[in-house]
Amino acid sequence: MTLKSRHLLGLENLTRAEIEYFLDTAGSLKEISSRDIKKVPTLRGKTVINLFFEASTRTRTSFEIAAKRLSADTINISASTSSVTKGETLIDTAKNIEAMRPDLVVIRHPASGAPELLSRWVDLPIINAGDGTHEHPTQGLLDLFTVREKRGKIDGLTLAIIGDITHSRVARSDIYGFQKMGARVRVCGPPTLIPPGIESLGVQKFHRLEPALEGADVVMVLRIQLERQGTPPFPTLREYSKLFGINLERLRRLKPDTLIMHPGPINRGVEISPEAAYGSHSVILDQVENGVAVRMAVLYLLSGRSVDA
Ligand code: CP
């Protein structure tokens, strides 16, 4: 199969078949990370630029590990240590990077649409590693991969996304990805953290946690993104935690096979208790492990081997 686009800007415009192609390729590549020598020559001679304008632990590290396991050369650029601090624009930064002839650019940026803008200005495959409140497609893919691995399917499952839906690019990628793969999606949080009209995306909206969790197969817990908000959208973190926090008492009411997920970073004791984050329902560290395989698949498939344009 071939992909319609040479870029990965979001899951909104991917077909179900394309999502399955990424997941199946990640499935084939995952075992490389269990070998004694965790390296294959697949992308030898290719150069991957990781251009990060926002902080990251999981995404940036796993893109770098993924590239290195495929034998690509990786260069990490942080806005804080680049000439962006001297006033250079995103476009000028990208044009200068392009002049050094890399093969793929991975970008995280606080502005929604920055990867799409880049894709129109430089002649390179662009991979969105999270843009503003828009999308985080590789997170969506690794979430899908983890659920499919643990439950054997996604079709017919119910996903409940809990928390700060308004500011979450993960929520958007998960809504698009899980629905395309046949899951029902619920969103739940205080009215100030759920965008008006969210139902137009095909999701069910809840403002109380208990009915949102009822019968859920997967619970995706989101962090409150205080860095993207002026004034906090609720009276106190303590109150938020009481009304929407996932803790042991709430875990006891879930089905035994319900998966607890979180894209990270976790605010311990706010949206999830440490016992719930590391308890028997949790697959949070499986998500992190699978991030490497998924990003290997994305780099491989966008490196020029399987795309039409
Ligand atoms: N899930 C995620 O994007 O984590 P980082 O911000 O640490 O990359």
Image (cartoon, rainbow, N blue to C red):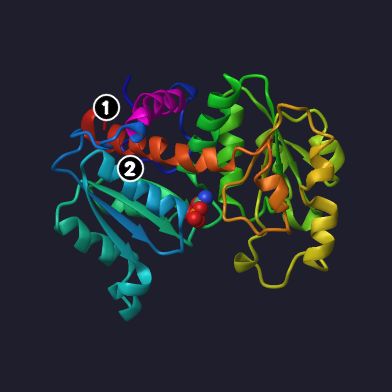
- Choose between 126 and 29: the one closer to the eye: 29
Residue 163 vertical position relative to residue 303 in the rendered view, above or below: below
Residue at the image position 53 percent from the left and 25 percent from the top:
149
Instruction: Pinpoint residue 232: horizontal percent, then vertical percent.
Output: 73, 69
Quarter of the image holding residue 93?
A: bottom left
Query: Horizontally, is 119 left or right of 113 in the view?
Result: left
Q: Which residues are magenta?
A: 18-32
Quarter of the image holding residue 308?
A: top left
Query: Horizontally, is 31 left or right of 42 in the view?
Result: right
Q: Residues within 10 Å of mark 2 (few under 14, many from 20)?
A: many
- Choose between 271 and 14: the one closer to the eye: 271
Dot 2 amino acid type:
Ala
Q: Which residue is mark 1?
A: 306
Q: Which residue is mark 2?
A: 66
Instruction: Pinpoint residue 262: horizontal percent, then vertical percent.
Output: 62, 46
Dot 1 amino acid type:
Ser
Quarter of the image holding residue 85?
A: bottom left
Query: Horizontally, is 14 left or right of 32 in the view?
Result: right
**Badge 2 residue CB within 8 Å of ligand 1:** no
Position of the C terminus by quadrant: top left
Residue 105 vertical position relative to residue 111 in the rendered view, above or below: above
Position of the N terminus by quadrant: top left
Residue 193 vertical position relative to residue 38 in the rendered view, above or below: below
User: Of callouts 2 and 1, which one flags the residue occurring earlier in the amino acid sequence?
Assistant: 2
